[in-house]
Image (cartoon, rainbow, N blue to C red):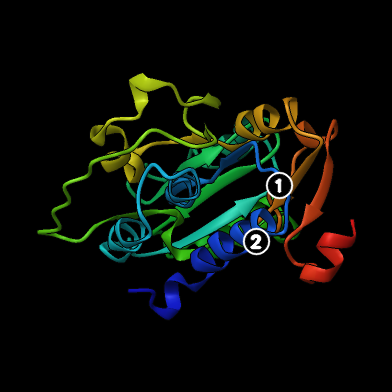
């Protein structure tokens, strides 16, 4: 079922299907972290029941997750004094980083780097499966391309098996590479989450999902 915590993911699927129903051609979908499950559902690789079963069995790890509009290598310089089990980068790229911290000194990290660079990430950005969770997946062939933020390209048959999807929460992703790949073959890119746009998207027209549906269609 779709719990309140999972509503943002349901809204992403609903918006894409509405656009398709209205005649918009979607050529590819992608996602950051476990949001790649939404891309898989949008492409018909997994069903909606499977999607919400997977998302519902995830639990945020303790601590806080942040989106930082700085390159990963810049952020890493500030983390040298923190143990890796307290602070780690779970995703990033040339311009954007995703940081998870269990450290009580997280506010100090924000002050050192600059709080203006930080934005709270979705709690499931850094998550793990609940103990005892079991899933048997039977992935189907995709109806549209799925851009993986882990390999920075459209998934081929090698990555479409059950193992890839079950290992998804433990992977480190590169959103800049994924956005660059999405922009390569697209005239328009629809952003489903705020604060994650990089210059890799400069070659495509950007529409922010924060706009109303009427505004999105008008563009």
- Report if residue 121 is visible in the image: no
In the displayed structure image, the side of residue 114 where residue 52 appears, left or right: left
**5 or 46, which is in the foreground?**
46
In the rendered image, which residue does mark 1 sit on? 69
Counting residues from the start of the chain, the first of labels 2 and 1 encountered is: 1
Tell me the element at label 1.
Answer: loop
Kindly report the distance in space between the C-alpha atoms of the residues bearing marks 2 and 1.
9 Å
Residues under numbered marks 2 and 1 in contact, where contact means CB atoms less than 8 Å apart: yes
Image coordinates of residue 40 in percent, x first then y, are 44, 44
Could you tell me how many numbered marks the image carries? 2
Residue 66 appears in view: yes
Q: At 65% from the left edge and 50% from the top edge, which residue is drawn?
A: 68
Q: Quadrant of residue 175?
A: top right
| Residue 119 disc label | 2
Task: Kindly identify the residue that appears in the image at 48 percent across and 25 percent down.
Answer: 151
- Is residue 18 depicted above or below 185 in this figure? below
Secondary structure found at label 2: strand
Quarter of the image where the C terminus is located = bottom right
Q: Is residue 64 above or below residue 148?
A: below
Bin the neighbour count of mark 2 within 10 Å (Cα to Cα): few under 14, some 14-19, many 20 and up: some
Q: Please indicate whether residue 147 sits to the left or right of residue 74 in the image.
A: left
**Relative image position of residue 81 (x, y in whole percent):** 47, 42
Image height of 7 relative to 97, above or below: below
| Quarter of the figure that contains the N terminus | bottom left
Q: Please state the horizontal and vertical placement of residue 161, each as a whole percent of the image.
A: 28, 30
Question: Left of 99 or right of it: where is 25?
Answer: right
Residue at x 55%, y 47% (from the top left corner): 98
Seen at 24% across and 36% down, the residue is 162
Task: Name the residue nearer the viewer: 214 or 57.
Answer: 214
Q: Residue furthest bottom?
A: 4
Query: Crowdedness of circle 1 by 10 Å Cα count: few (<14), some, many (20+)?
Result: many
Image side of residue 28 versus residue 37, left or right? right
């Amino acid at each position: 079922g779709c719990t309140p915590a999972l509503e943002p993911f349901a809204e992403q699927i609903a918006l894409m299907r509405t656009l398709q129903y209205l005649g918009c051609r979607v050529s590819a979908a992608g996602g950051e972290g476990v949001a790649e499950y939404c891309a898989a559902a949008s492409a018909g690789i997994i069903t909606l029941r499977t999607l919400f079963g997977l998302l519902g069995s995830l639990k945020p790890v303790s601590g806080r997750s942040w989106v930082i509009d700085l390159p990963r290598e810049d952020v890493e310089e500030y983390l040298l004094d923190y143990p890796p089990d307290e602070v780690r980068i779970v995703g990033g790229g040339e311009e954007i980083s995703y940081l998870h911290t269990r450290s009580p000194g997280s506010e100090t990290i924000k002050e050192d780097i600059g709080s203006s660079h930080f934005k709270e990430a979705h709690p499931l950005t850094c998550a793990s499966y609940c103990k005892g969770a079991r899933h048997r997946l039977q992935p189907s062939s995709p109806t549209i391309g799925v851009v993986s933020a882990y390999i920075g390209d459209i998934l081929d048959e090698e990555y479409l098996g059950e193992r890839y999807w079950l290992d998804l929460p433990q992977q480190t992703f590169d959103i800049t590479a994924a956005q660059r790949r999405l922009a390569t073959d697209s005239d328009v890119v629809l952003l489903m989450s705020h604060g994650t746009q990089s210059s890799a998207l400069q070659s495509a027209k950007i529409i922010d999902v924060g706009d109303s549906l009427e505004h999105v269609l008008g563009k």
